[in-house]
Image (cartoon, rainbow, N blue to C red):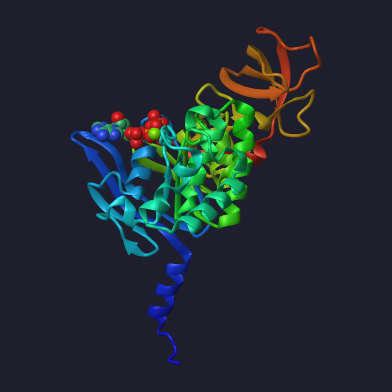
Amino acid sequence: MRALSKEHESAMHRAEDYVVELRSVSKQYGETVAVANVSLSARRGELVCFLGPSGCGKTTTLRMVAGFVEPTSGMVSINNIDMTHQPPYRRDTGMVFQSYALFPHMTVAENIAFGLENLKWPRHKREQRVEEMLRLVELPHLAQRLPGQLSGGQQQRIALARALAMRPAVLLLDEPFSNLDAQLRIRMREELREVIRSVDVTTLFVTHDQEEALTMSDRIVVMNAGQVEQLGTPGEIYEAPATSFVAQFIGWCSLLRGTVGPDGAFTSTAGLRLVGNWSAGPGTAVIRPEQIKLSTDGAAGVYLQARVLQSNYYGGATRIVLDVNGEQLTMQERFPFGRHPKPGDLLGVTINTNEIRILPTNDS
Ligand SMILES: Nc1ncnc2c1ncn2[C@@H]1O[C@H](COP(=O)(O)OP(=O)(O)OP(=O)(O)O)[C@@H](O)[C@H]1O
Ligand SMILES: [Mg+2]
């Protein structure tokens, strides 16, 4: 057998690596730029989440991958084939829409079999696949029900079964848990992760729920106003936000504007000084609640006196907004029952500066 050329080898490697590729994909509706220059390569079996506020272009991006929206510019490829101008049925994708859109007049089994019937699968093969899919989503007893006779969570799982029945290379999910209660959401997250792992399907998942994104994703695309703010693993996005938008959108944080002096210490505009070893220049300090602790001395960082501005009870913890030397900082602590601080109280706190990031201030 002839040895593969370097180019050939690397092309085959690419084919193996990436199932979905977006290259500078944009979509404009008249004056509105819905999506601007989004690029992404998703590996086989990878779960990539699109996260961002309402209207930032998540659904539009997903629909361009599915083929329901044609990009104004850029390229969408699936399994290394340019699909930019191909209709949805050619793309080997399965989609669960933002509202799950089961066919109301068809039973659960008919819904799941719909795509297979279009492909003219023989009846016994169809039935076999439907059964397999219902087992996968653990609802085999509901095959003959109509969607209207199912709970929201069950409809959700059937929509997922229908999308997976065709064994698509790419699964596209648009806020699939938006209508579920908090507990069912958490259970469905785990179930979906399991299902995705068991069939090894590449999945693009849209959510505006940061916790969902952090717990489920291999990587997260944070979007803002049609653009990608940051693309990274959940750990990278949370621990090393690239912009203040990302820092604020994922988890709680306080942002302090200021300057790092030649000695590496940060001084905020209001004069709060944090000793550290950052690079000199103007910057924004990102301080997470877990970096501030109650304390009586500075053994674990910078010790400060703080005045309580707000105190909100969340059950497991109390979130407190503090005034520290004229800056507002948010911290989180568990207090004994009946001992929650009140606005006006004075607290001693320590800021652990080791993990604080200073972003260059030129971002918006
Ligand atoms: N068919 C359309 N015609 C005109 N503008 C559109 C169209 N579809 C979407 N848009 C606009 O494009 C932008 C992005 O919309 P998109 O539906 O992608 O947002 P999203 O991130 O999914 O928001 P949400 O979280 O609310 O679902 C919005 O400003 C929206 O108004
Ligand atoms: Mg949407």
> At 39% across and 39% down in the image, what residue appears?
58
* Residue 84 location (% of width, % of height): 28, 55
Viewed as shown, does residue 349 lie left or right of 190? Answer: right
Residue 100 at what x, y percent from top left? 44, 35
- Residue 188 higher or lower than 337, as above or below: below
- What residue sits 58% from the left and 35% below the top? 211
Label tally:
0
The residue shown at (61%, 27%) is 182
- Residue 309 as seen in the image, left or right of residue 95: right
Near-viewer residue (34 or 347): 34
Residue shown at the point (31%, 41%) measured from the top left:
35
Asked whether the viewer can see residue 265, the reply is yes
Q: Is residue 315 depicted above or below 302 in this figure?
A: above
Quadrant location of the N terminus in the rendered image: bottom left
Q: Quadrant of the C terminus?
A: top left
Residue 275 visible in rendering: no
Residue occupying the far front of the picture: 123
From the viewer's side, name the closer residue of 21 and 39.
21
Outermost bottom residue: 1
Q: Quadrant of ligand 1?
A: top left
- Across and down, in percent, residue 218 comes to 55, 50
- The quadrant holding residue 121 is bottom left
Q: Residue 288, image x and y in percent? A: 61, 31
